[in-house]
Amino acid sequence: MRRAVRTSAVALTLATTAFAATACGDSNGGKQVAADQKQTLTVWAMGAEGEKLGQVAEEYHKAHPQITVKVTPVGWDVAHQKLVAAAAAGTLPDVAQMGGTYLGEFADLGVLEPVDTKVFKKDDFFPAGWDQGVADGTAYGVPWYVDTRVLYYRTDLAEKAGIAEPPATWQELQQDAAAYQKKAGTKWGLYIQSSGLDTVQSFYPFLYSAGGTLIDDDGKAAVDSPAAVKALEYYGGLFDKGLVRKSVTPGYDVTKDFNTGDVPMFFSGPWHRGILNDQYPDLKGKWAVAAVPSDRSSTSMAGGSSLVVSKDSEHKAAATEFVKYLTDAKSQADWYRLTSDLPANTAAWDSGELAQSPDLQVFRKQMETAKAAPTLANLTEITSKVDEAIGAVTQGKSSAQDAADTAQSQVESLLK
């Protein structure tokens, strides 16, 4: 998963305190280098993107010889820590890849340049992709790639279980999970995360499909709303009925059980297409993807990354041009062919494999209604409380209502 490891609260506090004295204004005194002048852009990109972006940077330099793009690959496991340290020291790169889970934090620190909405148009991107770059009503990140969760299911085992179509509703999901066990002999009906760090990401498709959210439009906690409690009751009920295993070992890889048939359904993002195709070629033709089963709607979570420009950069014009290049439709389609990252620019989906693949079209349709998590400075603290609530329900330690009430109180305190 494309996530950064959380730094400790103490480390964040120290970094924020050190940064506070220099956060406001350009440290370079407002000096800016024009885009047509010779210069070097510094760019941080994370994970697999960091390894691939250098190739794109070389091609960009050929077309723009005055611009040298220096790409520094950063592991997702240290990305957040490095960004915090750089923000505190005033040494952020000109351009950085930033996950939506912590964009709100860096926007709150005042280190990001607002997006020029005359250059970048919201309507060019998936709504949830754009929303991940917005904090307090201001866009700070331009969507680079997106992902969302859909349902992966074994079609061959569905046939044995007498299932003709993938489940379209919560009721059908539960019925199909039971049918897989009873008729196809699977050990479990499906896999969803039971507890621990980021369980909320497994829960989001249920929460959103029920019409719930963690934070409402007024910025208030909504963890104990009727929709949220309904989703939590249903989620916990899948464990109570023995359809999902209540615990797994650290580092659990669902694809192994999906391959053996012990787990016939699971929710995940587009990266699992590549994993299944590459590591389990014998499964070809035996699995497919489908939209998230609906309650009030079929609404999944949005993931991915944005590109941000440092507020203190001396190369904002060139940085903006480079970000524009990376996020236009043609470059996004090329980037998909290089990395398999799903384009955030919707026009990139109008031709080639992105337009022709039935699997990819499932992801496109799901992205059109997906919801982004709230962009708050302390989002990880908030979601950790929801993780605890979900775990309490799935492990039979609390009712959905009581767990939601406890989390509601905790989140309200964090929002003060």
Image: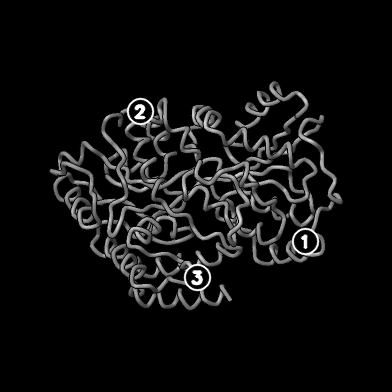
Is residue 286 shown above or below 301?
above
Q: Secondary structure at mark 3?
A: loop
In primary-sequence order, the first of circles 3 and 2 is: 3
Instruction: From the top left corner, tell me how far across and down residue 352 is, in percent.
Output: 42, 25
Disc 1 residue type (three-letter) = Phe
SS at badge 1? helix
Name the residue furthest front: 118
Which of the 4 image quarters holds residue 272?
top left
Q: Residue at x 68, y 25 (%)?
A: 58
User: Which residue is denoted by mark 1 in the rendering?
Assistant: 19
Q: CA distance from mark 2 to mark 1?
A: 49 Å
Q: CA distance from mark 3 to mark 2?
A: 40 Å
Instruction: Between residue 269 and residue 169, name the one nearer to us.
Output: 169
Q: Write down the residue under mark 2.
A: 356
* Front label number (2 vs 1): 2
Q: Secondary structure at mark 2?
A: helix
Q: Are marks 2 and 1 in contact (CB under 8 Å)?
A: no
Which residue is rendered at x = 30% and y = 29% of the image? Answer: 284
Which sits earlier in the primary sequence, circle 1 or circle 3?
1
* Label number found at residue 43: none
Residue density around tag 3, few if under 14, some if 14–19, many if 20 or more, within 10 Å: few
Distance from the alpha carbon under mark 1 to that under mark 3: 29 Å
Q: Quadrant of the C terminus?
A: bottom right
Residue 271: where, in percent of width, then height? 44, 39
Q: Residue at x 85, y 45 (%)?
A: 31
Q: Is residue 94 left or right of residue 290?
A: right
Q: Nearer the viewer, mark 1 or mark 3?
A: 3
Reading the image, the residue beneath label 3 is 218
